[in-house]
Image: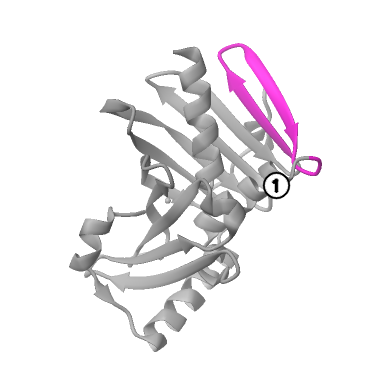
Amino acid sequence: MHKNKVSFTCRLILYIMAGLPALFPLRAISQNTPMDAPSIASLRNRVKEVSQQTTTISCDFIQEKEMNMISEKIISRGKFYLKKEKKLRWEYLSPFAYLIIINNDKIYIRDEEKINQISLKSNKIFLEINRIILGSIQGTLLTDEQNFSASFFETPASWMVRLKTLAPQLKESLSEIVIWFDRKDVTVTRIEINEAGGDFTRISFSAKRLNQPIADEMFTVR
């Protein structure tokens, strides 16, 4: 159980993302209306503007994981914090306690009483992880045409961006990321991650608080 828990969380870090949050499975895309070029350009600009104006994000999250090897869905709950420029905290509270922190060039993972530290500068894989996490939450992946092919859709309540993986090094493990943005405040409300092997992760964000003070101590591990 301990080994599965660590493996599951490491995969989450690799494919997010961004400690940040929405997708539907492919069968649901047909329910959304494709966006035209002017609407896409407008959305990209609005996401960029909101990201530039947002210094902190804190919210609750529910994560649902579907794995080919397990018949039951794995549901986790916790807290998410983001502080510019490079501070991110994923805190899992149930069904087990688990903590992931990215602070500038370091990643800290606390599993029960054990703490692991990884340098982003010396580890290209985790450097890419960090880029994908922050890019998902801050919207920069919408213009990352080198690594993703983006398709844009809309519903009365949301905008949905489907990012199909192009980069060979990502394609081996990640099929696509789909991000949902709330029309009210242009923030990410949900992320779904489709892995190349068929596993699926949905992260839904709620009780979002923007630009509220977050102490730097939240991004340290003790």
Residue 109 sits in quarter: top right
User: Image quadrant for the C terminus?
Assistant: top right
The residue positioned 36% from the left and 54% from the top of the image is 22
The residue under the point 46% across, 27% down is 92
Q: In which quarter of the image is residue 182?
A: bottom left
Q: How many marks?
A: 1
Picture coordinates of residue 158, whole percent (x, y): 29, 65
Q: In this view, does 154 lie to the left or right of 16?
A: left
Q: Residue furthest bottom?
A: 38
Bounds of the magenta segment: 106-122
Q: Position of residue 209 (x, y in %)?
A: 45, 48
Mark 1 crowdedness (10 Å alpha carbons): few <14, some 14-19, many ≥20:
some
161 within the magenta span: no
Which kind of residue does numbered mark 1 sit on?
Answer: Leu
Against 145, is 169 above or below? above
Name the quadrant containing residue 113.
Answer: top right
219 with respect to 35 (left or right): right
Position above or below: 91 against 96: below
Which residue is at a point 57% across and 58% down the rendered structure image?
Answer: 135
Q: Mark 1 points at which residue?
A: 127
What is the quadrant of the N terminus in the image? top left
Question: What residue lies at 43% left-to-right and 56% top-to-bottom?
Answer: 176
Q: Where is residue 129 in the image (x, y as percent from the top left)?
A: 61, 46
**Is residue 112 located in the magenta-colored stretch of the structure?**
yes
Residue 220 vertical placement versus 185 (above, below): above
Please provide percent x and percent y for residue 96: 43, 18
